[in-house]
Amino acid sequence: MAIVSRTELRAALASLPRARLAHLPTPLDPCPRLSSLLKGPRIWVKRDDCTGLAFGGNKARQHEFILGDALGRGVDVVIQGAASQSNQSRQLAAASARLGIECVLMPRRDALYEQIQGNQLVSRLFGATVVPVDASQSVKKAKEDMALKLRAEGRNPAILGMGAPEALSLAAVAYVGAYLEIVDQLEAIGEEPPSHIYVTSQGSTQAGLHAGVRLLGHSTRIIGINPMDARNEAYEPPAAIAQQCENAAGILGYSLSVSPEEIHNSTDWVGTDYGQPSPAAQKASALLAKTEGILVDPVYSGKGFSGLLGDIEAGCLRPDDRVVFVHTGGLPAIFSYSEASLDR
């Protein structure tokens, strides 16, 4: 049963502080050749790789709400730490440059750190301060230490990403809005809401989509394909994602009760590890490129798409299902994983 109408939900989103950064709404592209080749289901790609900010990606939407809130609190420097080829870091560096606040990035010294290419190159072009963290250390702890140092200097820092639950909940709010876009775009072509949405997600993106479904009373199933598992410091289990759903609804002025059992977030497609290509992602990425002219990278969005194809091959989806794959971006990583991007 619907808790709220689409009109009311739009109004709730519009009432929040927001820094306009993304090109919205993003396209919803049908994939007729791919759908025909697979003999169903009908597939659309929600092109959040086209959000416009620094080669696009899902984080542009999220930073609108995260940084809108931060600016309202007088934040003058943001801190983020992740893998050296982080999509989040790239888009945060661009957003910070546009908004005139300092950005400190704390990438892991992982296997790709010394290669100034892809996301890491782009982040540096936007003027971010880069402070690497040894691969054996906690990035979360390093970010907390950096925030303490900056506060001692009289700055007003904000930690983003893992270790920042408020920011993660605001990131989920952004994808309540994305779900509204998907429903509106399908309605405009005479289609009902999708039966399934697949998305590569560590937590917030999936949480927002799920919250949107629940708030509107729809039956759409949100299937998250996680590019990491519990070996990674940033991994969030279904219970944490369920909490983010509830938090996002609360920010918008509504109450939801979401059980962990509702959250389908699969780690079956991680492959060797986070940030490393998988054969399934390479194969899936090549198929999408060659049938629809759409690129996904082999370590993030490609893993989500491999999960969708795997479920189709396993018979988990019917030929008459209506599936939206949310393309979360990550295209600069193709250049850092050039060999892995080719399905040989």
Image (cartoon, helix red, strand yellow):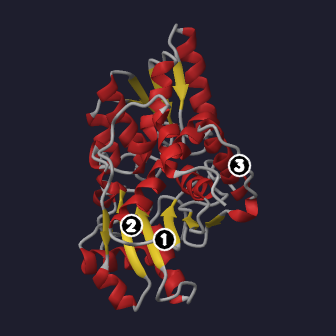
Q: State the residue in front, 125 or 193.
A: 193
Whether residue 344 is visible: no
Image x and y of residue 92, in percent: 40, 36
To which quarter of the image does residue 1 belong?
bottom right
Instruction: Give the residue type that dot 3 points to.
Output: Leu
**Circles 3, 2 touching at the beta carbon (< 8 Å):** no
To which quarter of the image does residue 222 belong?
bottom right
**Could you tell me which secondary element the residue under label 2 belongs to?**
helix
Identity of the residue drawn at 49% across and 35% down = 80
Report the residue marked by disc 3.
256
Distance from label 1 to label 3 (Cα)? 21 Å
User: Quarter of the image containing the C terminus?
Assistant: bottom left
Image x and y of residue 198, in percent: 50, 68
**Label 2 CA crowd tier, 10 Å (few <14, some 14–19, many 20+):** some
Identity of the residue drawn at 59% across and 41% down = 169
**Could you tell me which secondary element the residue under label 1 belongs to?**
loop
Instruction: Give the residue type that dot 2 points to.
Output: Leu
**Could you tell me which secondary element the residue under label 3 belongs to?**
loop
Please give the label number shown on residue 186.
2
Q: Is residue 19 above or below residue 324?
A: above
**Circles 2, 1 touching at the beta carbon (< 8 Å):** yes
Image x and y of residue 75, in percent: 48, 19
Q: Give the mark nearest the N terminus, 2 or 1.
A: 2
Q: Is residue 246 above or below residue 70?
A: below
Identity of the residue drawn at 29% across and 67% down = 295
Q: Give the mark nearest the N terminus, 3 or 2.
A: 2
